[in-house]
Image (cartoon, coloured by chain):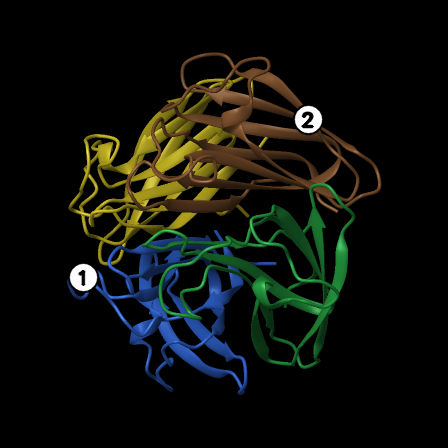
Chain colours: A yellow, B brown, C green, D blue
Amino acid sequence: MGRTQWAIAEGWIPAGSHGPEPQMTSHETVCLLNTGDQDAHVEITVYYTDREPIGPYRMTVPARRTRHVRFNDLDDPAPIPRDTNYASVIESNVPIIVQHTRLDSRQTENALLSTIAWTG
Amino acid sequence: MGRTQWAIAEGWIPAGSHGPEPQMTSHETVCLLNTGDQDAHVEITVYYTDREPIGPYRMTVPARRTRHVRFNDLDDPAPIPRDTNYASVIESNVPIIVQHTRLDSRQTENALLSTIAWTG
Amino acid sequence: MGRTQWAIAEGWIPAGSHGPEPQMTSHETVCLLNTGDQDAHVEITVYYTDREPIGPYRMTVPARRTRHVRFNDLDDPAPIPRDTNYASVIESNVPIIVQHTRLDSRQTENALLSTIAWTG
Amino acid sequence: MGRTQWAIAEGWIPAGSHGPEPQMTSHETVCLLNTGDQDAHVEITVYYTDREPIGPYRMTVPARRTRHVRFNDLDDPAPIPRDTNYASVIESNVPIIVQHTRLDSRQTENALLSTIAWTG
């Protein structure tokens, strides 16, 4: 179930946060669901406004598992800069489902957004 | 109208709440719409990060009705743990439409998100 | 451009509001876009949890125009009750694009959500 | 990767803001991602409730780049009025991916929404 190629055109990790760490740290998350019986080998490429894309960031979603990955935590091949527009493409060797969530806790109260990633 | 298989890659029931109960309790809801003339028998399977999926959670959406089901209230075969990442797959014997909403009332003011579930 | 049949599985008009009227009144909006050269005759049917669907609510979106309709304002054939779960199906004689937005101002600060409606 | 024609049925730039400029200015953003090896020449047309559409607003998204464009900043052929409902169609000569985000900072705390644009 799912697709092997997804895209998220919107990305932004705010530099500041309010509230208890780490749950209330401002963050961007990509939620990956693998309902199949084979492990999914996933590669994320990050696109920027004014330089070449960076990646792949590699991760595995085991068979019949979900992984919610924070863009904040990605650091190989390079961390994602704060307060910078980016976008991402998610590719997998087996079909998966991808959703995108952001918690923005720069101000006292939080804003939260979620969008299904795009697949063709 | 609709599809028989849907997925929600993002799931999280916050442990705490602010505001009057039960409307302002933090919750995750799956909204099911059955526009057809036959009852929809729906099965939800919940996926986790580090253990086997749990389910099916069974429910019926009568013909020409909508049901908004709180993941908080599911308890057969097992309740969904709080503060834990999960994902879900929704399957129905007849076509339905599925949407996902979360009210997060951990802090004084609330955050609200909604996303159409994914269908292939 | 668009489709002739759309569905929104999630609906809820909160009973209370904070902030200046009418912009900050809690409301649910369906945004209709008609990019074509023919007027769109649109019919909305509203589905409930425990009674038969009500409708059609009829409206026109002129050629090359957008209309943002508040569910709060619909009253023919009947107003939509507050604090009640509902869902809706939007049908048009020509292709249109449909999106769904909610402003929830029950508490001091507002929550806002938006989702593209579903089309098959 | 992507499509050449997208639509966003919902648009609204609030007239007021709270918080530090320009990050916390109320704004509507269209996020454009071009994963291909050819520059994307993009044209946005803006639709209104009671007058003819205005456009095209022209911009380029270079090969392998993302651009996050604020509707607030568009002014050729004409700025987009505040506190006014609008909708938009985004067309490109090569496939792109389009997402829509709004930060609403009219009240002290912010509301944030994001939705994938619609493509047929």
The chain letter under disc 1 is: D
Residue depicted at 26% across the width and 58% down the height: A49
Residue D74 vs residue A24, the one in the foreground? A24
* Pointer 2 residue: B59
Q: Secondary structure at mark 2?
A: strand
Q: Is residue A113 visible?
A: no
Position of residue B39 in the picture relative to residue B100 (left or right): right
Q: Give the amino acid type for the residue marked by disc 1 in the picture.
A: Gly
| Residue C88 badge | none
Q: How far apart are the alpha carbons under marks 1 and 2?
A: 46 Å
In this picture, residue A20 sits left or right of residue C110 = left
Vertical order, D30 against D77 (above or below): above
Horizontal relation, residue A70 to residue A75: left or right: right
Residue D19 image label: 1
| Quadrant of res C80 | bottom right
Residue C11 location, x and y as percent?
Answer: 58, 50
Q: Are marks 1 and 2 in contact (CB under 8 Å)?
A: no
Residue D105, image x and y in percent? 28, 62
- For residue A94, above or below residue D22: above
Residue B73 image offset from top left, x and y in percent: 54, 25
What's the amino acid at mark 2? Met
Question: Which picture quadrant has residue C58?
Answer: bottom right
Residue sitting at x 59%, y 17%: B55
The residue positioned 54% from the left and 80% from the top of the image is D49
Q: Residues within 10 Å of mark 1 (few under 14, many from 20)?
A: some
Quadrant of the image containing the C terminus of chain B: top right
